[in-house]
Structure formats: C-alpha cells, structure tokens
Amino acid sequence: MVADSKLKKLAQLFEPYSKLYAVGGCVRDGLLGLDCHDTDICSALSAEEVTKILEGSDYTVQEHNMRMGTLIIVTHNFRAEYTAFRVDSYDRRSGNHNPSGVSFTKDIKEDALRRDFKCNALYYDILSDKIVDVLGGEEDLKNKILSTTDEPDKVFEADGLRILRLVRFSAELGFSIEKDTFESAKRNAWRVKDLSIERIKDELDKIFTADTKHKELNLKDAHLKGVRLLDELGLMEILLPEVNALKGLSQPPQYHLYDAYEHSLITFLNSPPEIRWAALYHDIGKKICMDSSGNMHGHDIIGAEKAGEIASRFKFSNKERHKFIFLIKYHMADMEEKTRINKLRLFVVKNIKDMDDLVKIKHADCIGACGKDRRFRIEDVIDEVRNDGTPQSVQDLKVSGRDLVEMGVPEKLRGRILNQLWEDTIRNLSLNNRNSALNYVKRRVEKL
C-alpha cells in the first residue's frame, strides 16, 4: 500500500509521540486492490493529545465524539476519522448497542479485538509502509472469508448491527462466511430487533446495492446474494416479513416460472439500484389477496396500501415513499395492453417523472416471471408524448391564466378550465394551438 501525501504528512506530526495507523475498510480494500472510499486512522494517543499536536498545523480538528476518543481531521481535499486505541464494554441486558463503558489502551491488539471482523482489524503503519496484523486478517483476505475478531457470540452480542454488516461485506466483497461465525449470526439474528430502524434501513440500502460498491469486482448478483443471506440467517422474516410471506405461494404456470417469493427475488436481481425496494416488494399484495379472496386480482392496489405502512415503518423520505408506493401500485399498468390509448396518454403525462422507473420495474417483473423480456406499449406512448408536442403541464398550454382574465373568466373557474383543457389536449392534440385553445375556453365558459 502507498499512503496519500497528506496522510504521510499527518503521520509525521504524530511520529514523535506515537505511530499513526490507517485501519479498517481502507486497509482491507487497499490490500484487495479496491478503491478506498473512507479513511479511518488510529493511534495510542487520546483525542485530547491529538488536538494539541495538531494545533497550528495545516490540519483542522473537528470534535466528533470525545467520549469514544474520535475526531474528524481535515485539510484541503483530505478527511479522516481518528479513533484512539480503546476497549469497549457492553451491558448485554440493556439492549443498547452503544458501548456502556469505554477505556483507552496503548495495546493495538486490545483495540483490534473490539472490532467486528478480522479483515477489518488490519492496521497499516503509514510511515513504515507495513501491515500490522495481530489477529490473522490477512489470511482471511487471502481465503476470501469473514470471521469475527473474538468469539462470534461475544462479537454479535455486543452489537446486532454486526450481523447485518456481515451480510453486507459478504455480498459486497464476494466473501464466504466462516462456519462458526455463520452459525453464531444465525443464533443471534433476533438481536437486530433492538436496533433503531435508521441503522437497519441504512444497512439494507447498502445490501440492496451491494453490486455497486466495488464495480471492479464485477459481482453482478451481489445484491441478490445479500438478500439470500438475510433469508439463510433468519433475518428475512424479522426485517422483511411481507416478502418472506410470499414463500411457497404458487402462481399461474402459464405466466410464471416461480412461486411469488422466488419471482420477487428474480425481479429484484434484474432491477437497477434505484428501484430495488419496490422490485423486492412489488407483489406483496398477492399473499394478502389470496388470504382474503382466494385469488390475486387487485394485488397491485392492495400491495400499494400495504406499502404505505412499510414506508412508514422504515421511515422512508417523502421521495422514497412516493416512488415505492407508485411503482407497486402501477407495476401492472396496461400489462395486457387493452387500456384506451387516450386514457393511457393521460396517465403517462400526469406521471411523466415516474415513467422511466415504471418501465424499469416492468422489464424486471417480466424477466422475473418468464425469464424473457419484451417491449411494452406504454414505452411507445412515453416516447410519443415526449416528442409530439404534448403539453407536459398546464404551463405548456397555448393559453394562460392571463388570457382567461382578459376573457372575463371568473377567478374561481380559471384553474378548473385550464386543467380540463390540459387533460383534453393530452387526449386530442388538435387543441394544441392557440386558436383552438381559445375557442375551447369560450365553449367551456358558455356551459358553466
């Protein structure tokens, strides 16, 4: 490994007092020949000592969590999180996965033992340009395996989030999981129930996009591997129960190769990162419908209703919530291509910002159903309304509110008339010229 010049300069400032090490993911990824995304550094110095050492230097210290001995150190185009060597202790009865006790140490091995996996407990002596491996992390890297730094039960008891991190690293790196570590994670899967939903959501987001983390590894099905690992460890039924409920739910063989659960996973596999939550959940309404009516009719609408609850549970942002519910609700839109074309045009234009994502989930759903893809009629309509001059909003009409004022249209009627004109113009482009639009308004006013 070769340290960045700013990192070397920082290590030189530490040198009279302590060696400075890079640690964790940046070392692991560097040894694997992968791009480093974040820089974590550590030494035997306390946060207060580091602050004093860097006074008057080119490096600015930002307090981060002094109790945990952590700082953010920045300079031009450089940012690193510093943590003093420490030993963490946990109250295993409280369900709180933040350390209840923190003590600082000069012993690098004690610091290594508080970490999660051996491949994340590798240290890089920056000035000596040497790897310091006190637990066997290099051997795990060589064998592409994940094992815990200490007894697995002890590691997972300390923080249930480590079980989700185990899944994520296995998916992102293409690593297998050491047998005892896997069995312990499975035994301790229930511990994720104590985690905040924000921590769970953050890890699931990363698992669902695991194929994008290290593109140089070309792990195109890494996200699917992550979801299957969630299932194998018993996390699916805890965290994603609506998807888990689809297991064994048979589907009409003339349309589907798989049961509803496997179909959802194959759809998820074939979807781009931005729609994967919806892809995984798009058919959850099928189980609800079968339980209530014995068929799957209307599963899209029922699924969208349930999606609102799920979005609230995971505290989706407003943008995430809208996309999630919209794609589940409309993934069957014009599936049989029998919708009246004017109605379809209106639907497309009124939801134009969501159409690209809708097409993506339709293609993924198609592959997940029969293993083959096809072009949908709605794609032709999308192309048409984007290129044939169709007004994309009321503001694109050939008349405006000012025209209606000059025509003496009462204020309370203007918005209604313009919106109706917009919808009718979408259906009938002959209205998309000024004279026709003005005549339309006159006729509407006369009828009101």
Image (cartoon, rainbow, N blue to C red):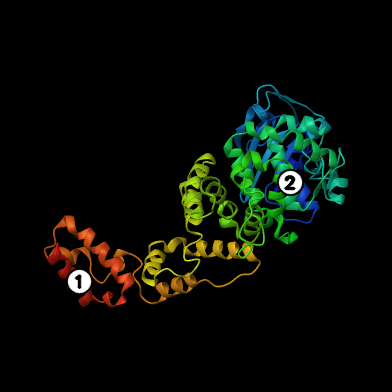
Badge 2: how crowded within 10 Å, few (<14), some, or many (20+)? some
Query: Is 307 placed above or below 333 here?
Result: above
Q: Is residue 301 left or right of residue 29?
A: left
Within the image, what quadrant is residue 72 found in? top right
Image quadrant in which the C terminus is located: bottom left
**Which comes before the other along the chain, label 2 or label 1?**
2
> The residue tagged with tag 1: helix, strand or loop?
helix
Residue 400 position, x and y percent, is 23, 66
Task: Name the foreground residue: 322 vs 115.
Answer: 322
> The residue tagged with tag 2: helix, strand or loop?
helix
Q: Is residue 94 left or right of residue 352?
A: right
Please state which amino acid type lies under the numbered disc 2: Gly
Within the image, what quadrant is residue 406 found in? bottom left
**Residue drawn at the location 62% of the way across and 49% of the way down:** 246
**Residue drawn at the location 29% of the way across and 64% of the way down:** 394
Query: Is 407 placed above or below 258 here?
Result: below
Give the residue at mark 2. 25
Badge 1: how crowded within 10 Å, few (<14), some, or many (20+)? some
Residue 90 position, x and y percent, is 71, 25
Give the residue at mark 1. 440
Within the image, what quadrant is residue 116 found in? top right
Task: Name the foreground residue: 148 vs 78.
Answer: 148
Please state which amino acid type lies under the numbered disc 1: Tyr
